Image (spheres, rainbow, N blue to C red):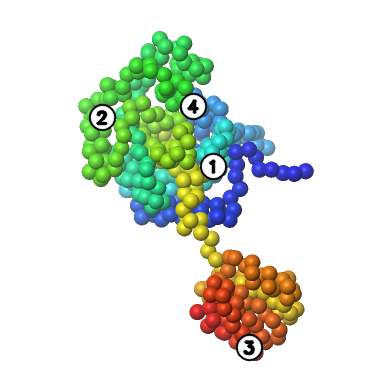
């Protein structure tokens, strides 16, 4: 039987896995500079957690969630996103009691959605995300967007546009929902089957629908429902973005595929043609001030976060040679005489205690294989061949030179090789 990876998943190796790690390392470095700490939560959670937080009428929950009964008859789900698990951990471990300072977390890991796989849209994909808990301020919102922008810059990704919308409080969002519902009920016949079914429960989803969002429905604008306080909040937020030279595009119909957002929501979209129109969102995020309380914090505990899709970054960055550059070995060791094989073992062990990256081969070599190895060894700067007892040759593969090394014992060999490598 031939096994294949499940549809919508990927194997990453060679340059691809190097690219993946480099991206994550750069994101981690920037997150740490902004004083974020890593939080690691399970890939499996109670399915109910996602139904409660993401919303039962969202695409993710209606169509895409991987859920199953475990052997103990518990309904579990593979996480489709990172926020719900982080907040579950904050509640369960009472991390909210540490209220002295704003809590800043980052996470990175695999997420699962039963999607229609295409370029930049997988069933198993990886997100790097951040969550900031305990503070509500337009300035913090701006700092979170600045973090996202700094991360894009660190990855040398240009040509992105920050799309921004502001929902205000739950009450404002509810009024907007009601106003939209009234229009949609009149225009119901124009909507797709999915939207017709869900408008009563979740009219905002129409704005997120691939088909219906393109209809000219003359919907009201959210800003018509802002209170004076909300107007001021949004004004302060946009003025601070401008002060920090973070370009943005206010998009009054931007919604996100998860119901827990209120306040500001945003997406960084790529203008590159590599990803295609429906996969061009690199980062999605926003404020979700009520989720912590809904999941068990005894008081309101405001929060904001965003997540990057790492596979989409990889598609944009695969031509950046330095990010997928595989570090060559300093030295590769082989032997063409039997007793040399065990010498390789101890020489490699000693060399690995120094600064060098080394490897070797424990199959005995003949002369023909030796010349093939010299010709074909691409991922190493130097090759050492143990020729016979006490004699070896170092081939500088990059400089195309060779040096004969004679030695009495292993300690002396190590010393001479280290000297030659420099
Ligand atoms: P979301 O959790 O839906 O807000 O998505 C946040 C980011 O994760 C998106 O902007 C994408 O970059 C990425 N993403 C979401 N779904 C997928 C997917 N199915 N495949 C690859 N990346 C995804």
**Residue 35 in view here:** no
Residue that appears at 45% across and 13% down: 190
Mark 4 Cβ inside 8 Å of ligand 1: no
Which residue position is annotated with label 1? 125
Mark 4 closeness class: few <14, some 14–19, many ≥20 residues within 10 Å: some
Mark 4 or 2, nearer chain start = 4
Mark 1 or 3, nearer chain start = 1
Q: CA distance from mark 4 to mark 2?
A: 26 Å
The N terminus appears in which quarter of the rendering? top right
Which element is circle 1 on? strand
* Residue 344 or residue 285, whichever sits in front: 344
Residue 223 left/right relative to 112: left
Observer-side mark, 2 or 3, equals: 3
- Evaluate if marks 2 and 3 touch, with contact meaning CB atoms under 8 Å apart: no
Which residue position is annotated with label 4? 58
Q: CA distance from mark 3 to mark 4?
A: 71 Å
Q: Which corner quadrant of the image does residue 288 belong to?
A: top left
Q: CA distance from mark 2 to mark 1?
A: 36 Å
Which element is circle 3 on? loop
Count the marks: how many? Answer: 4
Residue 407 is marked as 3
Residue 230 is marked as 2
Q: CA distance from mark 2 to mark 3?
A: 79 Å
Mark 1 closeness class: few <14, some 14–19, many ≥20 residues within 10 Å: many
Mark 1 Cβ inside 8 Å of ligand 1: yes
Observer-side mark, 2 or 1, equals: 1
Residue that appears at 59% across and 53% down: 13
Residue that appears at 51% across and 19% down: 194
Which element is circle 4 on? loop
């Amino acid at each position: 039987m031939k096994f294949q990876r499940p549809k919508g998943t990927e194997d990453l190796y060679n340059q691809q896995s190097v690219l993946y790690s480099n991206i994550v390392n750069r994101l981690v470095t920037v997150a740490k500079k902004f004083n974020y700490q890593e939080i690691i939560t399970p890939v499996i959670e109670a399915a109910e957690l996602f139904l409660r937080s993401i919303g039962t009428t969202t695409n993710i929950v209606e169509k895409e969630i991987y859920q199953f009964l475990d052997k103990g008859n518990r309904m579990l789900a593979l996480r489709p996103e990172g926020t719900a698990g982080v907040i579950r951990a904050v509640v369960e471990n009472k991390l909210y009691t540490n209220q002295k300072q704003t809590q800043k977390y980052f996470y990175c890991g695999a997420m699962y959605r039963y999607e229609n796989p295409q370029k930049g849209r997988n069933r198993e994909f990886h997100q790097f995300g951040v969550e900031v808990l305990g503070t509500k301020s337009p300035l913090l919102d701006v700092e979170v967007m600045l973090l996202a922008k700094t991360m894009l810059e660190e990855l040398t990704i240009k040509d992105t546009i920050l799309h921004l919308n502001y929902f205000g409080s739950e009450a404002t969002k509810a009024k907007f929902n009601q106003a939209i519902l009234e229009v949609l009920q009149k225009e119901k016949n124009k909507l797709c089957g999915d939207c017709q079914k869900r408008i009563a429960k979740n009219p905002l989803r129409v704005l997120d629908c691939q088909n219906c969002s393109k209809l000219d429905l003359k919907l009201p604008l959210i800003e018509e429902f802002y209170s004076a306080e909300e107007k001021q909040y949004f004004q302060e937020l946009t003025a601070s973005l401008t002060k920090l030279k973070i370009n943005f595009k206010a998009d009054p119909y931007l919604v996100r595929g998860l119901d827990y957002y209120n306040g500001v929501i945003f997406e960084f979209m790529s203008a590159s043609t590599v990803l295609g129109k429906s996969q061009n969102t690199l980062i999605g995020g926003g404020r979700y001030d009520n989720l912590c309380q809904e999941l068990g914090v005894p008081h309101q505990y405001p929060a904001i976060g965003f997540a990057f899709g790492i596979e989409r970054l990889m598609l944009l960055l695969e031509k950046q040679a330095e990010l997928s550059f595989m570090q060559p070995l300093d030295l590769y060791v082989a032997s063409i005489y039997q007793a040399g094989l065990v010498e390789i073992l101890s020489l490699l062990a000693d060399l690995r205690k120094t600064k060098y990256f080394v490897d070797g081969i424990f199959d005995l070599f003949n002369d023909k294989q030796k010349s093939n190895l010299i010709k074909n060894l691409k991922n190493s700067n130097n090759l050492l061949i143990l020729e016979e007892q006490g004699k070896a040759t170092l081939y500088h593969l990059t400089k195309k030179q060779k040096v004969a090394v004679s030695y009495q014992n292993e300690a002396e060999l190590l010393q001479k090789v280290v000297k030659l490598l420099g």
